[in-house]
Image: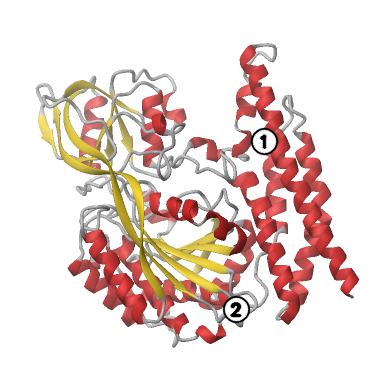
Amino acid sequence: MSTTLTTSRYSIASVMAHVDHMQKTFPYRKSGLGQDLAAANYIVDQLNGCGLDATLEAFDAFDSDPGDAELELLGPDGRIIQARACTHIEPTPPEGFVGSLIDVGAGGLDDYKGKDVRGKIVLAEVSYAPATPEKARIAVSHGAVGIVLMNWGRDEGTAIPARGLKAVWGNPTPQSWHDIPRIFGASISRKDGIFLRSHLARGSVRLRARIAANRVWRTLYQPIAWLHAPETAAQHEQFVIVSGHLDSWDPGVTDNLTGNGVMMEIARALAQRRDELVRSVVFCFWNGHEVAEATGSACFVDTHWERINRHAVAYFNIDSVGMKDTTEFQINASPELAGYSRRIAKECFGENVALKQSDLKRVGDQSFFGIGVPAATGRHMFSSDIIGAENGATLGWFNHTEFDTMDVLDADILDRDLSWCGQFVEHLCTDEILPHRFMPRLLDQKKRFAAMLGHGADPADLYRIVEALDAVTDSVSWFDTYLDRQGSAGGAAQPANRVVIRLSRLLTFLTSSACGRYGQDSYGISTLMQPVPRLADLARYRELDPDGQEARLLKTELIRLRHELTDALTLAGDLLDDFKSRQSGAA
């Protein structure tokens, strides 16, 4: 980077010391294998030493460990292809499985059109289009028995990534148990993927696969560290959730030791200013992220649901910061926090860094959409030219491989990421008035419902949701203006911020979740790509005979979903109108 931004409040040297120590001492932090617990104890000791209340929180997790993997190309050009077993797979028979290979490109739903993969092995690219676990779920839904994942990066790349195929977010329930893909899977290098494609271009390809992995219930541990605001602070029960995952593949420097180091440094710096805190902060170092698919964060929500629901103001995730050769700053935020996120970036970087911003998607450890906690994340990212040249490698060709070392970390870029992350958290826990503004959320929802409803059949009077959005618009606009005028309003802040929390619970899940407030959507599930995931069945209804049984069943379901959404919007309007009435009375 051409411009180095430093801050006297946060020490990049401390961050780098944590990263260097952990990558040397705990290089393989795969959940449940021992070094994850040793790293967790190190973090707890460090944060207790800074004056936080840090402990190890235990939770049960449906986990998996990779075994051996071997792929053999059969035929006259036969050869052994180096492979890595995916986790959460069905192992092949000991003698192996022999089957035909079918290329499905990115592995999304549309990539299967016109292809019969029943009983076969599919070849798919590693990317987030869709996420890897969703690729496995889609493959199983089309009858495939195996999946081979070719890495992103340059076509000549030889790195082989570690990948998990569980698909279910957090621990499974009786309803989601069978959603875990029953499929064998292995990952290979980009170079070998191109080699297989070249053979497919000339005719059929058959592989022999010998792949093993286990599935196991085990107890995992993750550091949870509270920095409590003074009890004299009127809003000390409110809190910000700051997180990053602890578990990672060997050595996982940028994914996610840099995030862990940044979290520890922010905690240290804020602990020195405890007397200035308006609200508390909890630092969560998630375990069970990579393989158990966000089980640490999902279990945290399940364990602390009532406290989170009542008092959490925002969720902030720190992951894969400080990557070398990244030149753009990417913000992903809920609409309520979009303006605030952009303002912090402008304060940190001015015009020195290209700023990109988009809606926050359900990736990483975003286990808080259903419960309704507005969230954000941000980091320096690769330019679109680099990502295109490396076939979608948004997190670097080295992600999830042994090449994620100190060599792909840039301390200068990490310092800049540290500055933004630190200021983001600092303002959230020291400003009297929360920065959430809700008109961006409402406008986004209006656009989404308009796209979803369109001009097709509306069997469930879903237009009433749009009417409910219109009915609450003036009140939301008034509330945003009220918050803007308060500044550091002293006694007025506490009741206003309580409304912010309640309003976010009522509005966030409407267009951010497919399963509603009380569940967890499956990892990367394609339904979430719909403008309103909760109403995904509307598109299916429109393809059916309206007098058929399936359409009639879907109609009843959509009607009841309408009740859920209009009820939330009505409650939001009542909440705002009651607050406005109280303010008018006080004046």
Q: Earlier in the sequence, mark 2 or mark 1?
A: 2
Q: Element at badge 1? A: helix
Residue name at image x 32 percent, y 66 percent: 324
Q: Is residue 476 visible?
A: yes
Identify whether 487 is placed above or below 580.
below
In the rendered image, residue 202, in percent from the top left (x then y), is placed at 23, 23
Identify whether 252 is placed above or below 166.
below
Identify whether 110 is placed above or below 386.
above
Quadrant including the N terminus: bottom left
Q: Element at badge 2? A: loop
Camera-side mark, 2 or 1: 2
For residue 328, side relative to residue 200 (left or right): right
Q: In this figure, which residue is indicated by the disc labeled 2?
A: 278
Q: Is residue 346 visible?
A: no
Nearest to the observer: residue 583 or residue 426: 583
In the rendered image, residue 26, in percent from the top left (x then y), is placed at 21, 64
Residue type at tag 2: Val
Q: In this figure, which residue is indicated by the disc labeled 1?
A: 452
Residue type at tag 1: Met
